Image (tube, rainbow, N blue to C red):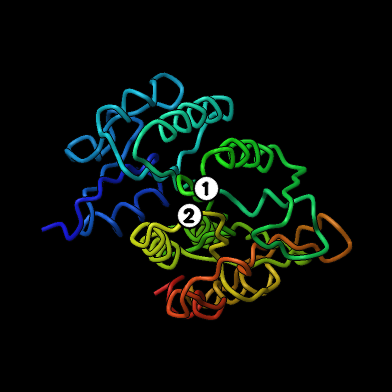
Amino acid sequence: MKLNTKKILILGGSGFIGNAIYKELCNYFDTYGTYCHAANSFSSNKQFIQYNLEEDDIVEVLEEVKPQVIVSALRGNFAALVIAHNHIAEYVLKKDCKIYFISSANVFDAYSKFPSYEMDKTLSESIYGRLKIKIENMLLRLPKDKMAILRVPMIFGNNSPRVKDMKKAIIENEPVEVFPNLILNVTNDDKLTQQIHYLINRNKTGIFHLGSNDLTHHEDFIKEILERVGNFNPIIKRVYTTNEDRYLAVLPKTNKLPKNLQFTIQDIIEHHVLN
């Protein structure tokens, strides 16, 4: 039995993050998701709707589901993503509906000297970061009570693509890449989905930085994870993009979540990366 009749649509619900959010919310809300390919295992789930970002009109999905909350974890063609979010913003403006957009620490990747906070100005040197900024700016024009921007650092977790790639590299005796000069904060699917659940449940809006409260070097973090994979001697490939330390971290300051939803890098390493 659902505890809440709030209707939620997760765009990108078959992906790693989208599906983790679906699993977190589906026992509490009337939750729907989208998947892309017809052969997908989600096609038999009546709560999932097929949606191809490049071929389908998102408005048709929105009109079919009539969600009160949209969570966008969409990935894919950048031009198609911009068009889809433009249509989503128009829908949200007209309807009794909010959007929670999963953004990225990359919206700050042009600032390498410091970690970034919620109200800092965005600036990116990467195509990916600039895409996220473009969509963020589109949503920031909506009334404040209709949108939340959720900026997320690197995501780990047992089934995360990053951890799977590391395991595969170790098994195949391939090098695992680390960035010795990169200072970052991190999260995982468990922590992130709990935080998103809280924000939706409490009708929170605005800009949130959903990562660990502390920082680490990428190399140190990856080495600690690798120690937990098993008794291997992985090949480490150090990739230097700069001679100086650079930050890619989104820390909470203005919009902090309750203590029970805050966490450290050690929490991620010990409990939520590799069981």
* x 80%, y 55%: residue: 111
* x 71%, y 61%: residue: 116
Mark nearer the viewer, 2 or 1? 1
Q: Which mark is residue 144?
A: 1
| Residue 66 image offset from top left, x and y in percent | 27, 34
Q: Nearer the viewer, residue 189 or 197?
A: 197
Question: Which residue has dot 2 on it?
Answer: 205
Q: Is residue 175 left or right of residue 194?
A: right
Is label 1 in a helix, a strand or a loop? helix
Name the amino acid, label 1: Lys
State the CA–CA distance, disc 2 to disc 1: 7 Å
Q: Is residue 190 above or below residue 18?
A: below
The quarter of the rendered structure image containing the N terminus is bottom left
Q: Is residue 117 left or right of residue 48?
A: right
Q: Is residue 120 above or below residue 127?
A: below
Name the amino acid, label 2: Thr
Is label 2 in a helix, a strand or a loop? loop
- Looking at the image, tell me whether mark 2 or mark 1 is earlier in sequence order: 1
Q: Nearer the viewer, residue 199 or 21?
A: 199
10 Å crowding of disc 2: few (<14), some (14-19), many (20+): many
* x 43%, y 72%: residue: 272
Q: Which mark is residue 124?
A: none
10 Å crowding of disc 1: few (<14), some (14-19), many (20+): few
| Residue 98 image offset from top left, x and y in percent | 40, 44
